[in-house]
Image: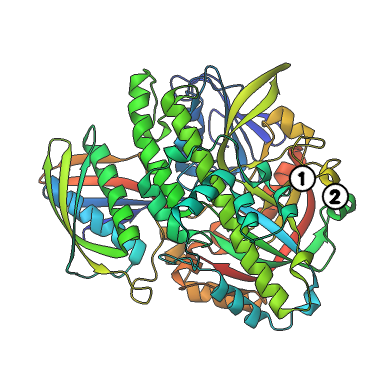
Amino acid sequence: MLPGIKRVAPFEWEVPIGTVPGMRVPGRFFLSDELAKTLEEGAVQQLANVATMPGIVKNSLAMPDIHWGYGFPIGGVAAFSIEEGVISPGGVGFDINCGVRILTTPLHEKDIVKKRELIERLFNAVPTGVGAKSTMRLSPKELEGMLIRGAKWAVDQGFGMESDLVHCEEQGAMAGADPSAVSAKARQRGMPQSGTLGAGNHFLEIQTVREIFQEGAAGAYGLFPGQICIMIHCGSRGLGHQVCTEHLKVLEGATKKYGIVLPDRQLACAPITSSEGRAYFGAMAASSNYAWANRQVIMHMVRKVFSGMFDIQYEEMNLVYDVAHNVAKREEHVVDGRQMKLCVHRKGATRAFGPGCADLPREYAPWGQPVIIPGSMGTSSYLLHGTNEAMVRTFGSTCHGSGRIMSRTKAKKALSGREVRESLAAEGIIIRAPHDGAIADEAPEVYKPSDEVVRIVDSAGISRLVARFVPLGVIKG
Amino acid sequence: MSFEELEHTADIRIRVRGTTLEELFSEAARALMTIVYKNINQGNIRRHVEVDADDTPSLIREFLSEILFVSEVEEMVITGADIHIAGNHLTANLTGEPFSTMKHCGGREVKGVSYSDLTIRHEGDSYILEVIFDV
């Protein structure tokens, strides 16, 4: 472990006040001894930087997928008092409400006999990669509908079922969205991109349930061994990127205006109750709603492809859940015995509310909120559920993925896209991407092993394993 | 092309050099476009952009963000920028080629230009920019 960091629990470590000047609270992160060597000084510094921000409550936190990002570390979680705290686009990221959903099918692994054809059909149905445009033609009024009503807008347009909504965090539409804070430029970018996957680490993956850890929870979530499921990972596209870019500039000015001193300009922030803070929250919520609508539209395309190719009905493919992993939300938590209204930032972290929490479908209530952890390309993905322990220790949060350990420059030198594609094909995993470069960037070797990351959150008790999925085919952006 | 990729775990961090501030900005724009579209040449489409900021690092962030915006909405791969900087105000005459999925594939989508570790320094007879792009 890096110097100055002390262990406070078997999988929990503390970054003491004083690690960087001006820290208001200690930093805490979750990591195993096995992954200690992957921890970067830059990530610890970013965790400590967040601890200097006004109104931060309890700890600046990071999940075991912690790595060096910009502003907050990836895997970062921080909660700020609504009355005295700040909101920061650096705690959310450019891809607002980047998130992931998983849907089930009644199909078994043995039913997928024409896998390559299935992958090709999905690749053709979902626009993918840099510059890809949607086949949808949105009017300005329709875009406004997406920004306010999110997944509900998509369902009302025929892209899905009413029952999908209760299976999304926030029912697929965050309250407080303010379309007037979303600029004409952001809308211009958002109009042609609804229902597009994007590029980078975004993907659509066909998986099968390989292992079940808790039968009760798996049953409640509708899973059985050998089942075919589909995972969709994407965000708010150019609209969200533009909202972040523009509000970051406004909040840079606000940081000076309110006399806030920060160690990193990317942490630019404003009091949550200020006009600048409220405008950013409204624009971020609207962008989050765009992302939920986007994933809803993509899921509709997937259901159409499956119901067209197999003897199954559209209605037989159920959404298990949809989680946001780049977002700031107004939540209430008990801190040191006191109920507090907070703005919880999760940047590369997932909400993991425990059993009985509000806003869950009734059948999920005894288990807690489903948490979806995508693996890196070619490795296992996991479904977990939130816990009461997470409510106490992490503001109801857990990890969001594996976490990178190798830069793209190193990955490119070490691995060619073709080699990665061929080695995965040898394991029976088909990769389809617009070009091989996108494959090398996201090869399994560049990430921490997802198995170890979920073992940590399960062992630490901040979420519990339910099921493991293995990939059969991947569409990369 | 005078830019190099530096180590960064999650994102893309580059170093760009120019003999003047204007050349530095122009090279940074070409570097950004090369990352997104991989193969960029010359083009004859023209666009004019203007941006303002409080200081030089902010000015480059605003300018590169504008390049991303124009490139995406105009479906234009920007291949050159004739830049004029007066204080914290920048005007640029951009040239570019039409985006083609066949020709311009192989790059990485840049989501934004970060303030984190954004530096511009003058060393000997050149300006050096280091910047992180979220990908």
Instruction: Tell me where residue A352 appears, x and y as whole percent.
Output: 71, 40
Instruction: Tell me where residue A223 appears, x and y as whole percent.
Output: 82, 59
Residue for point 17% across, 36% down: B88
Quick one: quadrant of the N terminus of chain A? top right
Q: Earlier in the sequence, mark 1 or mark 2?
A: 2
**Label number found at residue B70:** none
Residue carrying label 1: A385
Residue for point 44% across, 69% down: A437
Q: Chain of mark 2?
A: A
Are the residues at dot 1 and dot 2 in contact (C-beta closer than 8 Å)?
A: yes
Q: Amino acid at mark 2?
A: Ala
**Is there any visible trace of residue A218 in the rendered image?**
yes
Q: Amino acid at mark 1?
A: His
Q: Residues within 10 Å of mark 1 (few under 14, many from 20)?
A: many
Residue A444, compared with residue A82, is above or below; it is below
Instruction: Tell me where residue A41 appears, x and y as whole percent.
Output: 48, 38
Q: Secondary structure at mark 2?
A: helix
Q: Secondary structure at mark 1?
A: strand
Q: Is residue B102 left or right of residue A173?
A: left
Residue A459, quarter of picture? top right
Residue A308, quarter of picture? bottom right
Instruction: Tell me where residue A84 appears, x and y as whole percent.
Output: 52, 17
Q: How many marks?
A: 2
Residue carrying label 2: A217
Label 1 and label 2: CA atoms lie apart by: 8 Å
**Is there any visible trace of residue A472 in the rendered image?**
no
